[in-house]
Every structure is written in C-alpha cells, then in structure tokens.
Amino acid sequence: MNNVLFKSLKIGKHTIKYPIIQGGMGVGISWDELAGNVSLQGALGTISCVGTGYYKKMHFADRIVRSKPFEAINFYSKNALNEIFRNARKICGNVPLAANILYAINEYGRVVRDACEAGANIIITGAGLPTNMPEFTKNFPDVALIPIVSSAKALRIICRRWKDRYNRIPDAVIVEGPLSGGHQGFKYEDCFKEEFQLENIIPSVIEEAKLQGNIPVIAAGGIWDRDDIDKFLALGVSGVQMATRFLGTYECDAKAYLKIMPNLKKEDIKLVKSPVGYPARAINIGVLKAIEEGTAPKISCVSNCVSPCQRGVEAKKVGYCIADRLGDVSYGNLDTGLYFTGANGYRIEKIISVKELIDELTRR
C-alpha cells in the first residue's frame, strides 16, 4: 500500500502530523498508554482527566473511602494526572498531547490548570458550553483550547463570550454528532433524527467557524475508517476525532474492552439516561444489566464528580453513580461497570495495535 499523505492539522501553535484526534475516554480508558502511543504514531493522543484518582489502584489519591477516591479533589487527582502525563511523555516524547476535561465536572477550573501544569498542549472540553474556559489558562498562553459543540449556535455563543471577556476565539472546534460513545449533546429523541446527524450539522458549523475567524473544524461521532475520514475532509473539516476505534487496540488502558469489543453485537449498544443530564451511549452489560435485574449497587455519593448530579440526586433517579461505575471499568469489573462505546462499536472484529490502526487510517 502506498502512503497517501494527509495535510497536517494545525491547532494554535501545535502541529499534528495526521489530522486525527483520539477522543478522550474515561475513566481509565485513554490514559498514558493509549494517548502516548497515539501521539507517538503521529495523531493527537488525548488523556482523559476524568477519575484520575483511580489510576494505578488509587496509589496517587490522597484520600480514599470505601475503596473509592473521596471528594472531587481526589477523584480528579492532580498527583495522578501528573504521573499519567509523565508516563505518556516517556512513550511519545515532546509531540503534542491533549487533555479532555468535561465542563460538567466539579472543580473544572482547577482540573484545567492541573492539566496545563502537567504538560497538556491542548485542552478539549465538552459536556456543556465552556464559556469561561480561557479564564483558567491565562498563565499558559501556548495551550490551545478546543470546545466540543453540537450546533452552530453553540459555537456562536462560545465565540461571543470569549471575544467579549478574553479577546480570543477557540483554536479549533470539534462538532460531534449523535453516533459517538458516552454523553451526547442532543436530546434522546434528537439523536435519531436525520437533521442532527453529523454530516447535516457540519456545514452550518463550518460557516459559523469562518465567520468567527476561520476556526478549524474537527468532525466527530461515528467516524470509522479512511473512507469516512475522506468523506468529512471533503465536506470542509480540517480533521476528525475518533474514539471507539481505539477501544479495539491493545494499548487501550481499560483492558476489559479487549475482551468485550470483538464479541459485541449491534443490539448490545444502547442510549441510556445519565446523572449528568445527557443521554449516553453504552454497552448493555455491567451496571445496566444489574439495574434491569434489580441487583445494582447501592448509590452513595462519595466522589462528588459532576455538578449536574446534585450530590447523588440524579444518580438515584437513573439507578447508578457514574463515578463509581466508570471507576469499576478501570478495574475491569464486568458485573457493575458502565462501559461506553460509540454506535459502531460492534464493528470491531479483532484487537490490533495503535500503530496498525493509524497505518490503516492513513494508508491506501
């Protein structure tokens, strides 16, 4: 096969060899091993900052209660995040590395600063409109900022706030359609409507991005192979973000996925309610099965992970604590874990290396 060169992806002061961003996946799915190897192979590796207190069996969390990190200060452990970045850098060196930080988390600003101090070159934020994102990176002028949106209106609001308050615009924007794994930026019923599919929302976001200052647009949600990448590049985006494909790599930090993904069927993937307030796409195993069978673990808010949950109020409504159940994933607990995947997860037939995947995506 001949290597077909992509145009490199420029984000702020940083250049990524291939226009491919690995989506941030937590808890414990995209940490040092996955993100480090993705960046090593020329794409942009992204470290998830969610639930870092669980890293290395909570070795770096200062306070632990009932085998869980105690309070947001430890669920989002700075010490663990520093160690994750150090270990990722041992793999990839000084090429760009990103951090994914959900806007809905408690202590968002502190975690953004922690990621910058740990060495993140790029901060990516979804799960809400991060209208004050630049506030927390003022001391890190070289760090690029990428919000995730699901509409041109959302981008317009972010740009207006950033221009008024900080005299800047996003270095790039990710537009995510409703086929992605984890939390969606749409109402449940809208996830299935044609007008909200990725290829149909991209044109208006690209138009808005041009009006705001020629902001690079990254497409995300359901992108699977080289044909998909070429398709969206032809629509005018500068790059793509992919996450689910990396669940099928040996370097995925949550090793349980290596057993789960090759055996997945399309009907195993479903949209569920989440304590965060958005629908989320997950595999119907673990805690989701336990809820159906009436055997789900008791809900007791220990980590205080996301503000919309209101200290466990929303968790009790949907039947599970998102911090505890995602934490279980990092330990491979198939009985009580919450396992996210994109709509195409069932298409993973075998586990391959990150190098093999990047080669597949960048060669013809």
Image (spheres, rainbow, N blue to C red):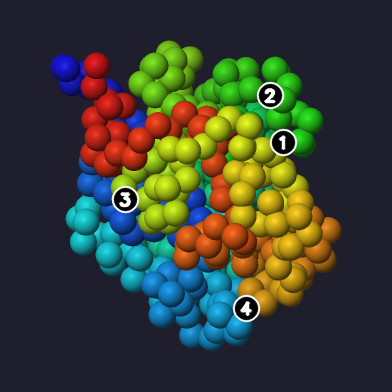
User: Please, what is the three-letter code of the amino acid marked with disc 3?
Assistant: Glu
The residues tagged by marks 4 and 2 sit, at their Cα atoms, a distance apart of 36 Å
Q: Residue farthest to the front? A: 293
User: If the image is split into quadrants, where does the C terminus sit?
Assistant: top left
Position in image of residue 340 (x %, y %): 57, 47
The x and y percentages for residue 87 are 27, 65
In the rendered image, which residue does mark 1 sit on?
A: 186
Residue 32 vertical position relative to residue 221 in the rendered view, above or below: below
Q: Is residue 149 visible?
A: no
Residue position for label 3: 251
User: Is residue 181 shown left or right of residue 293?
Assistant: left
User: Where 232 sits versus 217, above or below?
Assistant: above
- Residues 247 and 76: in front is 247
Task: Answer above or below: position of 235 versus 106.
Answer: above
Q: Which residue, given by chain and number where applicable, does mark 4 sit on?
A: 71
- Residue ID for mark 2: 196
- What type is the residue that disc 2 sits on? Phe
Mark pair 4, 3: CA separation: 29 Å
Q: CA distance from mark 2 to mark 3?
A: 32 Å
Q: Residue sitting at 28 percent across and 59 percent down?
A: 88
Say few, some or many: other residues with alpha carbon within 10 Å of mark 3 (under 14 / 14 to 19 / 20 or more).
Answer: many
* Type of the residue with mark 1: Phe
Q: Residues within 10 Å of mark 1 (few under 14, many from 20)?
A: some
Query: Which secondary structure lies at badge 2?
Result: helix
**First along the sequence among labels 4 and 2:** 4
Kind of residue at disc 4: Glu
